Amino acid sequence: MTLDRAFRLSSILLAATGFASLTLAIALPLWLLVLSGAAFAVALLRVNLPSGLSGVLQQVRLSALTWNIFLLLAFAGFWIDLLLISQELLPAGIHFLVLLLVNKLSNLDQRRDFLHLYAISLITLLASAALTTQIWYAPFFFIYLVAGVWTLLLYHLLQEHEESTGRHMLGNRTAPLDSTLPHMTARFFWTTNAMAAGAFGLTLFFFFSIPRVGVGLLQHSHGERLRTTGFSEQVDLGVMGPVKQDPSIVMRVELPDSPGTQSTRGPLYLRGVAYNRYDGKSWSNSLPHQRMLTELPQGTFTLRTPGAKPPAQARSLRQDILLEPLDTAVLFGAPLAFAVRGDFHSVQSDLMGSLHLAFPSHTRIQYTIYSAPTSLNPAERAAAAVLYPDFILQQYLHIPAVSPQIVDLAQRVTQPATSVSQAVTLIHTHLLGNYRYNLDVPSLQSAHPLEDFLLTRKTGYCEHYATAMVVLLRATGIPARLVTGFLATEWNEFGGYYTVRQRDAHAWVEVYFPRSGWITMDPTPPAPESIGQTWWQSAGRVMDSVRLQWDRLFVHFSANDQLTVVQGIREGGEAVRTKLSESLNSLSAQSAAMFRRFMSSFTSTGIPETVLLIILAIGATYAGRRLLRSSRNTAAPTDVLSAHQRTVVTLYTNMLHCLAQRGIVKSASTTPMELLRHVQEEWAEAWPFADALTQLYTRVRFGHDPLTPEDHSTAENLLRRLHTLERATTRSPQ
Amino acid sequence: MRFRRQQFISVATNNLQAQFRRLFLNRTIRVTREGIRFLLLTLAVGIAAVNTGNNLFYLLLAMMLSLVVLSGLLSEQCVRRLDFHRHLPDYLFVNQPTTATLRVANHKSRIPSVSLRLLDVVAGKDLDRGIHIAHLAPAASTRCSYPLLVRQRGPYRLDGIRIVTPFPFGLFYKKSFYPLEATLIVCPEIIPLPPLQLQELNALGQDHARARRGPGNSLYNLREFRPGDDSRAIHWMTTARTAKLMLKETEAEDRRSITVAISTVAPDEAENSFERALSIGASLIDHFLKDGYQVRLLLGDQQDILACETDQALPLFHALALCERRPMATGAAIRHSMARALAEWHEGPTILLSPWTDPVRNEQFPSADYIVSPQSHRELFNDTGSSLSA
């Protein structure tokens, strides 16, 4: 393939990559897609068609006037689009940009046309970067970078070729592609790809090095929020049902301090909102008052009051959460969260321990939550009766006017219990064993959903189970509340995190014990596990892991991450420095001890220590000087001949052999120049050949000139001719 | 020991300074038109990235910056480790084109040099000779020939070679200077002399020929044979007639001789005439040497130079190339010196070239057989095309 053809193809590829990424980022009108596709097709045909057909295609080109009218109409269309149709600058601008692209693709004649095409393709890539953060952007960016390196390089080489030969490749409509141009070789191909790889490496370096600053004058928030249910101020019983089929990812949760494999991990409860008031159909929070969390340095918000002793973080559960943009301001985390770290202006908490932002986030947010472990106090585990604070009794014992059968059921189930905790367990076990999990339950239409679940249908899902347990517990005088959130069960072994989806929305119960606090209980039977893991599911997890890394390393890379890297490098450097100094210290201590032992062995013989030191110093100095002198006097490294020098020595040796065969022998003491004079006297016909060979020999062997291929072939030719020469047997008379 | 340490430090410092100079002071970068547009686009992307804080904008910015850096790295590799050898003629004449050869060698073992443009650096200015090397493979060399035309007499100093490459993307011109000093002596222009005047000049001095004994064919004298004479020179016919051994003496085939004297005194306004006089002088020397004359050049108060054949003409032309016009204040001394020199030389006629016409001065050169001056030979001095700068 000639460089010219490669150049045109790479230019079209560059434009196509930008256009394709824009198409994926924003929905373009069908007519625009068709028009653009046609323009790309025509441009490709012009490059690849045989010369005859290409000439035909040239004949059907639209005139410059037609294209100018096209541009004017496109510009007018832009204003109509901006003012009347889309009424937004970005879509109108993108449509106009695509029309410009169509125009340029159809008129790639002059060098400036190609430059315009490159600028348009860059703007399309820029526009798609503004519209999306999806992972598919990464391969398009990579292809664009590679195509960009190819295109710029070929553009430059063709320009140089034009200037050196005076022939214009571009701008010549009638001439076919020039076949006399240099062709692309394998070496050129791989070298250019290596350049592209180098550019990619430099890109990554600059990307991670450029300080992140966001002025935010014209910041545009992007991304739609996921609609969630079950986290508002009032939740109707049964609202979670519809979302239980939705596989949309809500968040990803890493547990960096808790390594383990899937088999050792249990489900992770991610608490959202708690409710204490049930009116028979819906749950609500009668304690909506929220307070601001105390902000500590480094963006950490804590529930403790200033001056209070922080809980032991060593036993706490740290969760790094990447939360998708939701329509709720709730921050999810494991129960008993006591600290949050993230890029937030403020974090609030209500009286039931739920964490909230000031308003829902438009973008993905990343934060870390620290949660205390929950466990039932052993004394309370065995206690037959528990004394509850009045506040708890007032807020967490209320039950609506339910059927007496429910109250009777509660008493019947807890009758064998000898302790409060056993009563809780009995209710828990009763619900687990006597009811069937079923998502297909029309709760919203029912007037008494709880009675339907407990007494009639005996099927339901998490909300029914949790509501039933809370009501049954309260009926027996045990304070309890409903909690909604997510139950993370899907472990991504490739990325090392939990993938939490909409369908993982869950409701469970928290039971109050005065000393233990609120203990999590889940009366919902676990969902049947899927049989085996298909390769498709594994691939999906791999892709999700890649998507997470893309979000973390590229989309959400921030100044904090850069500081973390710098601190990590600094800490690593300090660690290395500390270890090195410790090693040196121990080495010097050992050496000192050995020296002391050595000295004491001599002084024990009666030689004064001072004299011994002087003798040792003199000896060391003498040895050092000997060493220094010997290193300086070391013979120069053997004269290693280079490949060129070896070749020229071979050529010269062949010449000497040839001369020797004709009776002119070079002795060891004869220099090349002296031999040359001898040849001139004895065999004048051979002198020109010998002179040229001797000059080449001295230049390469001693002058370190490179032996070029031309010189080599010339020398071989001279040798050949020397061999064919016959030396005259009689000398000419004086 | 201390001296050696100081020596080592000095050598190391010098090496570092040389490397710094080679790397930074001998390198210049100029942005091309495409490069300006690229940098403006990069700036726009950078502003967008800083404004929005969008990391994908930063990614695009990083890509553009990486292309800039890659361009710098690759262009630096292109212009490194090149070796130049210039082959120039020993001398050249004004307005006479000649061919210079430049041998370029790439000493890099793996990396080629691409898109090289070679410029001569003369008196600090870059002169484009149209030398363009598209590709120079690693460990390869190439020869480039280019025409050289100098328009000014005197030493023509070449400072070095400047390499310019826009490789790889044509965004920047990387320039590198390789010192390669060379000095050419540019001799005065050889101009065609009018045929009539040449005839006049050729006729000069014919009566100055003087017969003398020496090798030759013509008979000079017949005398008696003396012991020690060459027996082959015995003239047998005369010997038979006189009954004595008679020896034939032949006349020497004498070379014709001529002196070209050029006065170097001229006022500032006669600069062109002075240059023209030198050109005429060079042309005369060239003509007479080709005619087999022995030519002596007397240039102002300088030592006279003799040339017997064309191969010996170089010192004469060099002297003409390097001579300088002397102001009128020194005129008397120079005239006196010239007059004395001319008076002492008695072989052949003398042609005096005087760029400044002064009737009084002419009287001081009675030994001049032919005077060429702007007054007497206006047509020769009118065509002053040799004073253009190189």
Image (cartoon, helix red, strand yellow):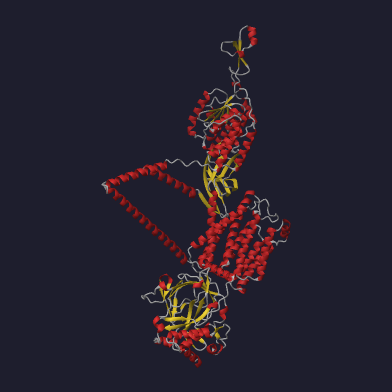
Residue B325 place in picture, x, y as percent: 51, 35
Please name whichever residue, A182 or A690, is drawn nearer the observer in this view of the structure: A690
Residue A661 place in picture, x, y as percent: 61, 31
Q: Position of A44 compared to A192: left or right?
A: right
The C terminus of chain A appears in which quarter of the rendering?
Answer: top right
Name the image quarter holding residue B352. top right
Res. B155 in view: no
Name the image quarter holding residue B191. top right
Please name whichever residue, A532 or A117, is drawn nearer the observer in this view of the structure: A532
Residue A528 place in picture, x, y as percent: 55, 78
Pick out the residue farthest to the front.
A605
Q: Position of A213 compared to A445: left or right?
A: left
Please name whichever residue, A554 or A338, is drawn nearer the observer in this view of the structure: A338
The N terminus of chain A appears in which quarter of the rendering?
Answer: bottom right
Res. B228 in view: yes
Residue A49 place in picture, x, y as percent: 71, 58
Number of numbered markers: 0
> Taking A597 as reference, is A515 above or below it?
below
Q: Residue at x 59, y 62 (%)?
A: A143
Pick out the residue farthest to the top.
B243
